[in-house]
DNA sequence: CGGCCAGGATTCATCTGATGACTTTCCCCT
DNA sequence: AGGGGAAAGTCATCAGATGAATCCTGGCCG
């Protein structure tokens, strides 16, 4: 077993057995490195791995802390890498998303509150009112997030959020066909929100499934290449334009 | 932006833009570190992060290679950390598993081949025949994996495999009530396999959902503490049972 | 001519030591 | 008692050297 593996599994074991609890600060690098029998460099690599997986969080100058270990923390680690998925694999992900969106829609319909319904319809109206594709995409995300929230399963909600984030990278709404797609999308949203308002889980599930399927079809049809940070959000003037 | 972040995002960007393709070998540490403007140590930490996420794979003496970037590769990274999830969060995961197992069961019923049915029933017979809890657990896993395979979505199959691996850590079959639980589990399996054999997606989905729900109930009822590599040794007087 | 093998070159793995940056704590001064 | 600043603690980064595993090249032998 390599030194980094020894540190990684050793640290993980400490957390699994409760010797290091959620939110707790882990021992300093020098100390922990000696205990695990590895150098500081190797230990740091192991800590970085756990940090990438959302298990620990290093804070410069303060220490390294175990995360809350909530499912959302773990699932969040997928968001950075799901963006690297080539399109063929993404379509398999869509099937999962379709099933889960249908499920949360049904559950939301069963558990909806008047406030949820109000929020959903106000988001729909905002979506129909705006012309900015970016804003529409953002509102679309919040619409679905609200439904997922109403289903009362934070883990599932964050998992779907990750899936949606990946889809949004394609920005179908900015295509020439964008306006037409948005009209159809808005219509889907009304059907879905109405089913939820009516406390009709079956219709809600059907509407959600159809909506995702529609999105999936668009993606198959257009298959636009995904580009990193295409929003032009990129603040730092780092020399990153250096690609051939 | 820290040096490690710079290296991490720089490397990720190279992969996202296709400058580094799937399966390709990335430049040597010294060279890449210079290009990204960070030391070898920082670069190595960034590479380790990507390795933990299943994006790259370092091979001692050979080089570091970009993975195939299939969804399974990414999902596999969850398996190491999902084990750290406290029980409350795990129950949320179970809801997801329930929905997805029902879906794959239905899809498997629709697409089943005679060979799939044969395999399923032979696994059931082996399960009913063995007395070894560990072997039963292994066969149970293979039974469900076979169904997921028949659903023809490798991503979904690997996701469910990760969920199941987490559940197996609890080893409910080794409890005093184990034999009784196993009898019920075996009965569930027969119902499920029969529904699939009959090409009855609805019944298959229902049976799968009921089966997962049953497992979930057992877990809620017994809530045994999960122990890393818990084969019953572990004599350290660490007094770690302290969770409220 | 072809296969085997030995040694060098390449690359990742690890350790050591030193310095900088950031945070937190605590004591001193007002 | 409160504010400010020094000092300690901790992570972040870099540089250099050595070890280990793999890959490749070229020569040797059959």
Image: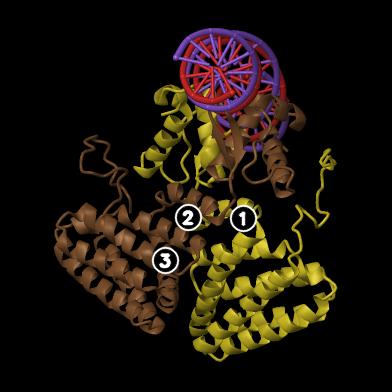
Chain colours: A yellow, B brown, C red, D purple
Task: Single out the mark in the foreground, 1 or 2.
Answer: 1
User: Residue tagged by mark 1?
Assistant: A82
Parent chain of label 1: A
Tell me the distance, in whole angstroms, between the alpha carbons under discs 3 and 2: 27 Å
x then y, percent, for residue D12: 64, 31
> Quadrant where the C terminus of chain B lies?
bottom left
Parent chain of label 2: A
What secondary structure is marked by label 1? helix
Task: Single out the mark in the foreground, 3 or 1.
Answer: 3
Closest to the observer: B236 or B16? B16
Residue count near mark 1 (Cα–Cα under 10 Å), binned few <14, some 14–19, many ≥20: many
Closest to the observer: B124 or A67? B124
Which residue is rendered at x = 45% and y = 70% of the image? Answer: B151
Query: On the rendered structure, is A121 left or right of B231?
Result: right
x then y, percent, for residue A11: 43, 36
Image: A36 above or below B17: above
Q: Check if mark 3 and mark 2 are on a common chain.
A: no
Can residue B186 be seen in the rendering of this structure? yes
What secondary structure is marked by label 3? helix
Closest to the observer: A213 or A129? A213
Task: Single out the mark in the foreground, 3 or 2.
Answer: 3
Tell me the distance, in whole angstroms, between the alpha carbons under discs 1 and 2: 20 Å
What secondary structure is marked by label 2? loop
x then y, percent, for residue A115: 60, 81
Residue count near mark 3 (Cα–Cα under 10 Å), binned few <14, some 14–19, many ≥20: many
Residue count near mark 2 (Cα–Cα under 10 Å), binned few <14, some 14–19, many ≥20: many
Can residue A68 be seen in the rendering of this structure? no
User: Residue tagged by mark 2?
Assistant: A70
Tell me the distance, in whole angstroms, between the alpha carbons under discs 3 and 1: 22 Å
x then y, percent, for residue B238: 27, 36
User: Residue tagged by mark 3?
Assistant: B148
Which residue is rendered at x = 31% and y = 75% of the image? Answer: B192
């Amino acid at each position: 077993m390599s030194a980094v593996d020894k540190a990684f599994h050793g640290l993980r074991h400490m957390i699994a057995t409760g010797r290091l609890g959620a939110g707790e600060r882990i021992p300093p690098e020098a100390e922990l490195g000696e205990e695990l029998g590895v150098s500081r460099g190797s230990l740091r690599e192991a800590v970085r791995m756990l940090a990438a997986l959302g298990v620990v969080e290093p804070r410069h100058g303060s220490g390294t802390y175990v995360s809350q270990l909530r499912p959302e923390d773990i699932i969040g680690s997928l968001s950075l890498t799901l963006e690297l998925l080539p399109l063929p694999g993404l379509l398999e992900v869509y099937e999962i998303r379709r099933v889960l969106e249908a499920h949360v829609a049904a559950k939301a319909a069963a558990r909806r509150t008047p406030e949820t319904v109000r929020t959903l319809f106000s988001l729909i109206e905002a979506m129909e009112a705006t012309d900015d594709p970016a804003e529409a995409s953002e509102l679309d995300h919040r619409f679905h997030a609200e439904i997922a929230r109403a289903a009362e399963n934070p883990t599932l909600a964050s998992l779907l959020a990750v899936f949606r984030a990946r889809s949004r990278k394609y920005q179908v709404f900015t295509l020439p066909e964008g306006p037409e797609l948005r009209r159809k999308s808005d219509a889907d949203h009304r059907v879905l929100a109405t089913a939820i308002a009516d406390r009709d889980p079956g219709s809600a599930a059907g509407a959600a499934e159809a909506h995702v399927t529609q999105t999936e079809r668009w993606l198959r049809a257009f298959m636009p290449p995904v580009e990193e940070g295409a929003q032009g959000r990129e603040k730092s003037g780092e020399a990153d334009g250096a690609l051939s």
